[in-house]
Amino acid sequence: MSETIIAKRYADALFQLGQERSNLHQLESELITVREVYASNPKLVHVLQHPRVTLDQKKQLVAESFKPFSKEVQHTLQLLVDRHREEIIPEMIAHFIKRMNDAKGTADAEVYSVRELSDKEKQRISETFAPKVGKRSLNLTNIVDPEIIGGIRLRIGNRIFDGSVSGKLRRMQRELTSANK
């Protein structure tokens, strides 16, 4: 069975459990923290996947690392370690967050700009582009990229809205080179 399917099943089970116990937002914030720990600490991933580290040591490491978290998150992580599926933890978290976003009517998006955008500008971008992708709002991550010269480039999932000056220049260049052929 594909690891993606397995990760999705664990995420769905945790999501349903969170719905039953009415603590979805708590689970989401805890899983975001786990994702950040996983991303910022590659040694943890290495230890959890190392064959010489015993299963009990791995489970103890997970239990101590995520001690203040809910029983649901702790149990899910313990279960994944117990079944030797540590490598799907980030993918499982991504599926859970996607389910949460779908339930809330939001989507994650990256906005590239020359400078850091204000909260008001982010809000206007969210209000403008969320309906175009069938969502109520966008969770924007602002990435400063001086190479776009001006304007913004917005990425929502696999869709890109490019209103940057560099994007317009590239399109003009393509049109001019194709017209000359």
Image (cartoon, rainbow, N blue to C red):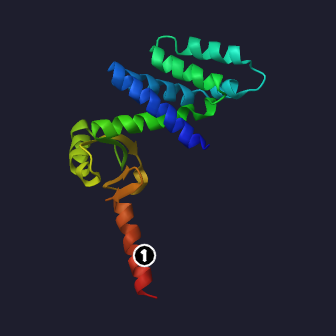
Tag 1 secondary structure: helix
Q: Nearer the viewer, residue 2 or 38?
A: 2
In which quadrant of the rendered image does the N terminus lie?
A: top right
Q: Residue at x 52, y 23 (%)?
A: 76
> Which image quarter: residue 139?
top left
Q: Residue at x 42, y 49 (%)?
A: 145
Q: Residues within 10 Å of mark 1 (few under 14, many from 20)?
A: few
Please state the horizontal and vertical placement of residue 6, each as a whole percent of the image.
56, 37
Using the rendered image of the protein, determine whether residue 117 is visible from the camera's viewpoint: no
User: Is 164 rendered above or below residue 126?
Assistant: below
Farthest residue to the right: give it: 52
User: Is 55 rendered above or below residue 94?
Assistant: above
Please state the horizontal and vertical placement of residue 126, each as a whole percent of the image.
25, 45
> Which image quarter: residue 25?
top left
Farthest residue to the bottom: give it: 181
| Left or right for 3, reference 124 | right
Q: Residue at x 69, y 28 (%)?
A: 49
Q: Residue at x 54, y 34 (%)?
A: 90
Q: Nearer the viewer, residue 83 or 164?
A: 83
Q: Which residue is mark 1?
A: 174
Please state the horizontal and vertical placement of residue 51, each as a whole percent of the image.
76, 26
Q: The residue under label 1 is which amino acid type? A: Arg
Using the rendered image of the protein, determine whether residue 110 is visible from the camera's viewpoint: yes
